[in-house]
Each structure stands twice: as structure tokens, then as C-alpha cells.
Amino acid sequence: MQKLRVSVSPGYILSSDMRARMSLRLVISAVVFLWMAGAPLLSQTTCQGPDKKLMWIIDSTRIAMIQAIDAELADHFFNNPCTYAFGSRLKPSIPAGWASIPAADFQSFADFQNAITNRTIDPSVKAILYDNESFSLTPPNEQVDPAYYTQQFADLAHAHGYVFISTPGTDLTTL
């Protein structure tokens, strides 16, 4: 594996290659941290057993960026049934032949309802990620009551056979 050295100075614009290298460093750092911390990120089904793996939730674009730098590393960490690779709900972009679980992300419950009603979610998608945040893609009513809409979203996802993943923005609450 090639060693990467990345240094960033304030005020410099990063090229796409530099962003990919930084993503790779973040992945490696996260793996080391989680391994050292013993984080309980193992699935209760397919990710247990003697060869336990970390469970990943990663954007398929990031997988492609890491693949461009080190295909073997990307394959090692993300080509397994413990990785949820999210991307387009119309056609997930997981590398051909990979065992990763295709997932689609939505920023609003209303969009998810419409996709269910109109049957626009690709049949290969097995998991749905609800990424509600305090921004224009999440409607104001969902921002005001995130617990209610998260439950509604989970119920609808489960009713249609999807694994439900919630990644709410921390900006939806105040302390």
C-alpha cells in the first residue's frame, strides 16, 4: 500500500485528488480509532461471527474516490455485507460484483413517501437513509418535530421491507 502524506494550509483550495487522499486518511483514522475504542458497530445479523467486521455507512462517491487511490484498500473495507453504500435512489452505484448493501438517502419524509407512491426507488436498494437536517431539503415541519417524522419514516421503510438508517443533523435540536 502506498503511503500518503497530506498537509493542508489555510487558504488553499484542495484538488479532487487531495480531497480523495484526505477521505482515505479519514477512513484509515476512523478504522484505527474504532478498533482501539472497541466501538460496538457490528450488525446483529450478517456482521457477527469469528470474522467480525466493522459496519460502514458510506456514500458510494467516497468509495469511488478511495478506489481511485487504492482499489485494494477500498475492496478490503467496503466490499462486504457489513457496508451500506448510499447514493442515487434511481440507480445505486456500487462497484459491479461487490457485496455491499445498496442504500438510498432522503432528506425528507415527504420525498420518501412520493418515491414509495411513484415506485421510483431502484429495486436493488435494500436500505433507506433518512438524512434530516436544518436546511432547505428538509421541510420546516420535519425540522420542528424530528422525532415524529423519524418514526413515520421508519414505519414506512419497514412496511416496504427496507432497513431503516437515521442520520439526523445535530442542528435539529438545541441544548
Image (cartoon, rainbow, N blue to C red):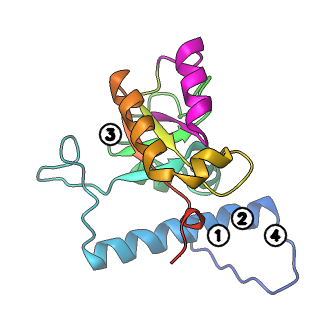
Residue at (39% x, 37% y) in the render = 154
Q: Tag 4: residue type?
A: Leu
Q: To which quarter of the image does residue 155 belong? A: top left
> Label 4 to label 3, Cα distance in Å?
33 Å
- Residue 134 in the image: x percent, y percent? 66, 58
Q: Amino acid at mark 1?
A: Met
Residue at 16% from the left image edge and 49% from the top image edge: 48
Q: Cβ–Cβ below 8 Å for labels 4 and 3?
A: no
Mark 4 burial class by Cα count in 10 Å: few <14, some 14-19, many 20+: few
As drawn, the label of residue 81 is 3
Disc 3 marks a residue whose amino acid type is Pro
Task: List x then y, in percent, for residue 111.
Answer: 62, 30
Is residue 105 found inside the magenta-colored segment of the image?
yes
Please tell me whether residue 19 is drawn above or below residue 112 in the rendered image: below
* Cα separation between marks 1 and 2: 5 Å
Q: In front here: 86 or 66?
A: 86
- Mark identifier at residue 19: 2
Label 1 or label 3, whichever comes before in sequence order? 1
Mark 4 lies on residue: 14
Label 2 secondary element: helix
Count of marks, rendered view: 4
For the residues labelled 1 and 2, say whether their Cβ atoms are less than 8 Å apart: yes
Instruction: Specify whether residue 106 is painted magenta.
Output: yes
Q: CA distance from mark 1 to mark 4?
A: 10 Å
Looking at the rendering, the stretch of residues picked out in magenta corresponds to 100-123
